[in-house]
Amino acid sequence: MAEIAVCLAIEQLLPILRKETNLLRGIHQEFSYIKEELESIQAFLKDADKRATAEGDNIRESVKIWVKQVIEVAFRIEDIIDDYIIYVEQQPRDHKCLALLCKIAHSIKTLTSRYRVASEIQDIKSSVKEIKERCERYGFQIQPTFEQGPSTSQKTKWHDPRMIALHVEEADVVGFQMPKERLIDLLVNGRLERTVVSVVGMGGQGKTTLAKNVFDSKEVIGHFHFRAWITVSQSYTIEGLLRDMLRKFYNSLTCDITNMDRGSLIDEVRNYLKKKRYVIVFDDVWNVHFWNEVESAVIDNKNGSKIFITTRNIDVAISCKKSSFVEVHDLQPLTQEQSLELFNKKVFQFDFDGFCPKELIDLSFEIVKKCKGLPLAIVAIGGLLSTKDKNTFQWKRFSENLRLELNKDCHLTGIQEILSLSYDDLPYYLRLCLLYFGIYPEDYEIESNRLFGQWIAEGFVKEERGKTLEDVAEGYLTELIRRSLVQVSSISIDGKVECCHVHDLIRVMILDKFDDFNFCHHISEYGQSFFSGTIRRLSIASISDDLKECIESSHVRSLLCFTDKELPEHFVRRIPTKYKQLKVIDFKDVELRYVPKNLGGLIHLKFLSLRNNRHIKSLPKSISMLQNLETFDLRDTGVREMPKEIGKLRKLRHLLGDRMSLIQLKNCIGCITSLQTLHNVSLDGDGDGAGVVELITELGKLKELRELGLVGVVREHGSYLSSSINEMKCLEKLDIESKSKEKVIDLHLISSPPPMLRNLTLNGKLENFPEWIPELQNLVELRLVRSQLTDDPMKSLKNMKNLLSLFISDCAYEGESLHFQDEEFHKLKELCIANWDNLSSIVIEKGALCSLKMLTLYYIPQLKTVPIGIQHLEKLEILRNWYMPTEFVESVSSDGGKEHWIIEHVPLVEFRTLDGTFIRHSKT
C-alpha cells in the first residue's frame, strides 16, 4: 500500500517535474553562456585599472566609474554561479521511487530560488550586452586573454637559492652612517636624566630603518640593561600600548594584565623600569598628545635611560620638551651619490657583480634623480627594475613613463605614484595577492602559511605542474618581496619566510585600490566609512551596533575579524544564513563562544580558522557539509574530540589542532587523500588499542602528507607507525611524542625514511639512537627531547650536510660531557642544550661549529663554567644563558668575571638568573 501511495503522489507531481525539467534545461544553457562571459570580463579587468589611469584627464574618471560598473557585473555573475551550484546542481542522485519523490519535493522547495536564478541570468545577459556596447565607445575590447601564471624566468627567480635578499631591511643602510653614529652617541653618551631622542622625516625617508640599525647596534645593546621596540601608528590606544610594553618586558607574565586599567598598567611599567637603564623605541608616532599619555609610565630614574621616537610630525618631537630633555634629528634625503649606491644595490644585487653596466649609467642617474633622495621610492623602483632585462631600450621606456608620473613634487602623493608603478607592473595574479595585505590591520605581521591558505581559498593561486598550491603561493610571496612591496618580519632557520608585512605607505596605496575595485571594506572605530556597491571582503576591527545592517545585504566572500572583543552571538548565528557565499572565515584571536549548528550551510567555505579560542569545545555535525573546506585551524581551542563527520571533507588539505582524538575517523581518515598537514593527533586515552592501530594504518594512505604530529605514542605502535611513515614520500615535518617519560619511541625507518624530511622532533625515550636519522640528507632541524640515550648522539650527527639547528633537551643524553671536534657540525647555525641534570663539561675545538650564530644553554645545574673553546666561534652573535648556576654567571660577568674575556667577542649575551633576574652583557 505504501508503494502505491508513493506512485500516486509521483503521478500527481509529474507535471511539476516536467516544468522543472524544462526550466533546468534553459538554465543550464544560459549558465554556460554567462560563465564564458565572466572569463572574458575577468581577462579584460586584468588591465582595466592601468587603462583607466592611462586615459587623459577628461575621460579618466568616467572610465574608472565604468570599470567599477564592469566589476559589479562580474561580482553578480560570480554570485549567480554560486547560487546555481546551491539550487540547481545539487540534486538527489538516486532514481528509486522514494528518492524520486524526495527529488520532486526538493524541486518544489527550491522552485522560487530557481526562478530567481533564471531571472537573474537574463538580467545579467542584458548588462553584459550593455558593457560590450560601452567598450566599443571607449575603444576597448572584451575578449578572453588567459594568463597562464608566471613566466619561466620568473619561476627561476622565485627559487633562487640566494635567499639573502629576504633578509634586507626596508632599505639597505646607505647614507645613514653619519646620522647613525650621532644617534648612537646621543643614546650611549648623553646625560643621566631621561632624554627623548626624535628622528623626524617624511614618509619613506628611512626613519624606521635608521632607528632599527641604531637600536640593534653593538654599542646600544651593550650599554642598556633593557631595550624594547614598540610600534605605535595612528590607531593606538594607551592601554594597548602599555600592555604591549609589559609583554616585551616579561617573557611570561605573573599577573593578568588583560583587565587592568590605565593606572594599574602605568604602575606595573614604572615598577619594572625603576632600577634599569633602558631604551624604548616608539616607532611611527602621529599624535602630538602621545608624550603626555606615556610620559608618566616611562620613569625618569636618572640612570641614563632614553626614549627614541620616530615621527613624520615635528610637533610630536617638540611636544616632548614640556617635561623632558629632547634631541631632534631631522632626517635629510639621500644625496645623489648615496641614492645611486642604494639603487645599484637593489637593481644589481645578483647581476654584474653589483655594479651598473656602462650603457645604463646615464639612465640610472636619470631614474634616481626623479626619486629626490627618498629611500622608499628608490627601493621600490630598484626592486621593480631588478626583475627586468638590463637593456637600454626597456630602461629608456621605463624612464620616460616615470617622468610622466612624477610631474609634481615628490611628497606623499608622488611616492604613491611611484609605488603605483610597481603595482601596475605586477602580473594580475600578484596584484590580487598584494591587495590582500590591506585586509589586515596596520603593522600586522602575517604568518605566511595563513596567508597562503587564504590566497588559495580566494582562487588567486593557479595550479602549476609538479607543485602544490602552497609551493606556488610561496613563489608569489617571494616575488612580492623581491619587488620590495612586502617585507619579511621573520624567517625560519632554512630561510623560509615565516611572517611578513607591508610598509605603511604600501598599505596606503593598497587602500586606495580598494576604493577603485570594491576589494574590501574595513569596519573600525578609527576608519568608519560609507560604502556603495557589492562588498566582497570584510575586515572587522570593531564591533559596532550598525554592523548587521551595514553588511547583511552584501555578498561577502571573506570575513576576517581583528578585534579582542567578543563577537555577539546574534551576529555569529546569522552567518550561515546571511553569508552563504563565504569562502574565508578567519576568527583567529577573536573571543567566540558559539559555533552555529548550521555551519554546514556554508558549502563554498574553503578556509576556516577558529584558532586561539578556548571557549570552543565542540563542533557541529553539520560540518560534514563543508565539502569544499581546505584549511581548518583549531589550534589553541578546547576542541579535542574530532567528530566522525570530518571524514567526509575530501578536499581538506590542512587540519590543525591540539592533541586531537581522531579515533572516530579510524576507518575513513585515509580517504582524505588531499591532506598535507595533520597537526597534532593524540593516540592516547582512546581506550581502544585495536582502534589506534587501525587509525595509524589508515594514516599510511595519506600519500600527500607534508606535516604530521602525533602524541601519546608507545612502543607497540612502532611497527605500524613505521610502515605508515614509510609510505609518506612527501613528508617534510615529523613530530613524535611518547605517552610518558618511560614509554619508548620505536621507529624502524631504515629501509626508506622520508627523503624530503626537513624537520624532525622525537620527544620520548629512545633505546638506541635511530640509525636512519643520519640518512636524512635534507634534514635542517632536529629536536631530541627526553631521549635518555647512553651513547653520545653527536657522533652520529656530526657530519650531516644540511643540519642547521639542533635542540638537545631534558636528558636526551645521559653523558656528563660533550666534545665538539674540529670540522664537526660545520653548517650548524643554532644549538640549544637544555634541562640536562648531569652535564658538567662542554669542549669546542677550533674548527668545530664554525657557522654557529646562536648558542642557548638552559638550566644545566652541573655546568659551572662557560664552554671551553667558545672563543673559537667567530660567527657567534647571540649567547643565551638561562637559569644557569650562580658560579657560571659570576665567572663570565662583565663586572670582574675571570672568564668574561672568553665571550667578549659575542655581540649579545643574555642571562636569566635562577631568581628570575634578566641581564644583558655585550662587547661595546
Image: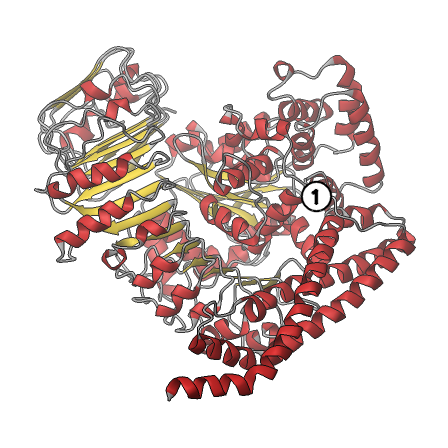
Left or right: where does residue 734 sit relative to residue 103? left
Of residue 48 and residue 105, the one placed in the foreground of this image is 105
Q: Is residue 693 left or right of residue 508?
A: left
Question: Where is residue 836 shown, x and y percent of the image?
Answer: 14, 33
Q: Residue at x 78, y 46 (%)?
A: 50
Closest to the observer, 86 or 279 = 86
Question: Please, what is the three-letter code of the amino acid marked with disc 1?
Answer: Phe
How many numbered discs, if any? 1
In the image, residue 152 lies at what x, y percent? Answer: 62, 28
Residue 312 horizontal side relative to residue 739, left or right: right
User: In the figure, residue 635 lies in which quadrant?
Assistant: bottom left
Q: Nearer the viewer, residue 148 or 397?
A: 148
Image-based side of 881 in relation to 839, left or right = right
Q: Is residue 753 above or below residue 696?
A: above
The image's colouring method is secondary structure
Quadrant containing the C terminus is top left
Q: Is residue 629 above or below residue 417?
A: below
Label 1: how many Cα within 10 Å (few below 14, some 14–19, many 20+):
few
Residue at the spot of label 1: 146
Q: Is residue 478 visible?
A: yes
**Residue 233 on image: x %, y %:** 55, 52
Q: In the rendering, at what x and y percent does residue 873 appear?
A: 31, 17
* Res. 855 visible in picture: no
| Location of the N terminus (image quadrant) | bottom left
Residue drawn where x is 50% and y is 26% of the image: 164
Q: Label 1's element?
A: loop
